[in-house]
């Protein structure tokens, strides 16, 4: 039933169409793309960078992005089981905020360097654990650029986020444990996936609100459905990863799964109602199946 819950043909078409459109905006010739999801993620960095350079009157940087519609990713790639990924470690204290968003971001550019070797190895190991748990398609298509922010202890709060204008990019804190980073990559890749899915099918969710046990407040249907998708994905991952962990990591992930069971158990009625706002039957079924499966864990 959950063989490939994140494979949706409309998303692949969206990636190809949007990439071609941005190439046209930048007035560059598209190269041979063997991985449309990776090209889609990277060209959004080029678009953001070029737009910022144009606003600042920085012709040299603008020209650099036109010459590098892949944001120079081949020079930054780290090999992983899901394909080459960009792993960087920008200083979180100096992440810029754009004019259209209060959320901090980092744009790949001419000064970007790869993350230190130990962080790249950590991330590659996290991809391997996520793939082993059955999330290879999700991570391959929706976790292309990883910005590792703050090193944290297991007792600390881990912060992560994505931005709709930079699909396939993930910003996250990290511990030294691949099993935990894999959980957070899957969570944020899930948000990227759902953003793409809603765009690909042209679904506009209404103004209905639902109580979110994660935020302990009423949230718009869009945010509620995102939570009822991304958290169940991490529950499924955690249940599958637990047998391969031990010690503190095992206890940490087990406690996380227990916590999520309690929170998710309060959502079935509202989730069923929120799903009626999803007009596409295939997407609605995917969201239902993952949520329902997580409830059985």
Image (cartoon, rainbow, N blue to C red):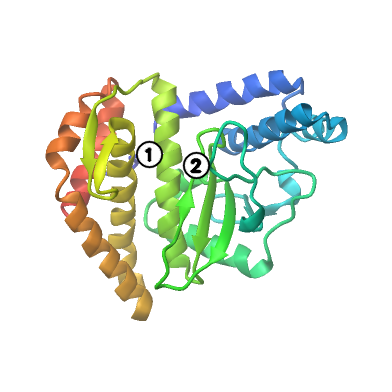
Label annotation for residue 96: none
x then y, percent, for residue 213:
23, 49
Q: Name the residue furthest left.
A: 269
x then y, percent, for residue 34:
63, 35
Q: In which quarter of the image is residue 92?
A: bottom right
Report the residue at 14% width, 48% height from top: 266
Q: Quadrant of residue 202?
A: top left
Q: Nearer the viewer, residue 92 or 236?
A: 92
Report the residue at 12% width, 38% height from top: 269
Q: Where 85 sits versus 46, above or below?
A: below
Where's the C terminus, which quadrant? Answer: bottom left
Q: Do the residues labelled 1 and 2 touch (CB within 8 Å)?
A: yes
The reply to whether residue 290 is in sight is no
SS assignment at label 1: loop
Label annotation for residue 142: 2
Residue 260 as seen in the image, left or right of residue 129 = left
Disc 1 packing (10 Å; few <14; some 14–19; many ≥20): many
Residue 275 as seen in the image, left or right of residue 83 = left
What is the spatial separation of the Cα atoms under label 1 and label 2, in whole angstroms? Answer: 10 Å
Q: Where 65 sits versus 128, above or below?
A: above
x then y, percent, for residue 15:
54, 28
């Amino acid at each position: 039933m959950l063989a490939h819950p994140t494979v949706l043909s409309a998303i692949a078409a969206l990636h190809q169409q949007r990439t071609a459109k941005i190439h046209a905006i930048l007035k560059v010739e598209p190269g041979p793309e063997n991985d449309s999801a990776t090209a889609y993620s990277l060209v959004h960095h080029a678009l953001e960078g070029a737009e910022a350079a144009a606003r600042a009157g920085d012709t040299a940087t603008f020209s650099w992005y036109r010459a590098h519609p892949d944001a120079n990713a081949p020079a930054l790639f780290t090999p992983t089981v899901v394909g080459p990924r960009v792993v960087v470690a920008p200083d979180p204290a100096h992440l810029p905020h754009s004019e259209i968003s209060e959320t901090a971001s980092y744009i790949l550019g001419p000064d970007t360097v790869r993350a230190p070797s130990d962080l790249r190895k950590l991330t590659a190991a996290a991809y391997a654990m996520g793939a082993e748990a059955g999330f290879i398609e999700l991570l391959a298509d929706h976790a292309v650029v990883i910005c590792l922010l703050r090193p944290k202890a297991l007792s600390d709060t881990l912060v992560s986020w994505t931005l709709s204008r930079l699909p396939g990019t993930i910003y996250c804190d990290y511990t030294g444990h691949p099993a935990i980073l894999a959980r957070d990559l899957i969570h944020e890749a899930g948000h990227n996936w759902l953003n793409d899915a809603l765009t690909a099918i042209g679904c506009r969710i209404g103004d209905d609100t639902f109580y979110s046990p994660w935020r302990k407040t009423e949230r718009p249907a869009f945010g509620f459905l995102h939570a009822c998708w991304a958290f169940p994905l991490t529950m499924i991952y955690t249940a599958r990863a637990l047998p391969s962990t031990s010690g503190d990591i095992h206890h940490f992930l087990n406690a996380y799964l227990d916590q999520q069971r309690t929170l998710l158990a309060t959502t079935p009625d509202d989730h069923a109602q929120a799903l009626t706002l999803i007009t596409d039957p295939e997407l609605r079924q995917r969201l239902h199946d993952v949520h329902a499966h997580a409830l059985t864990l």
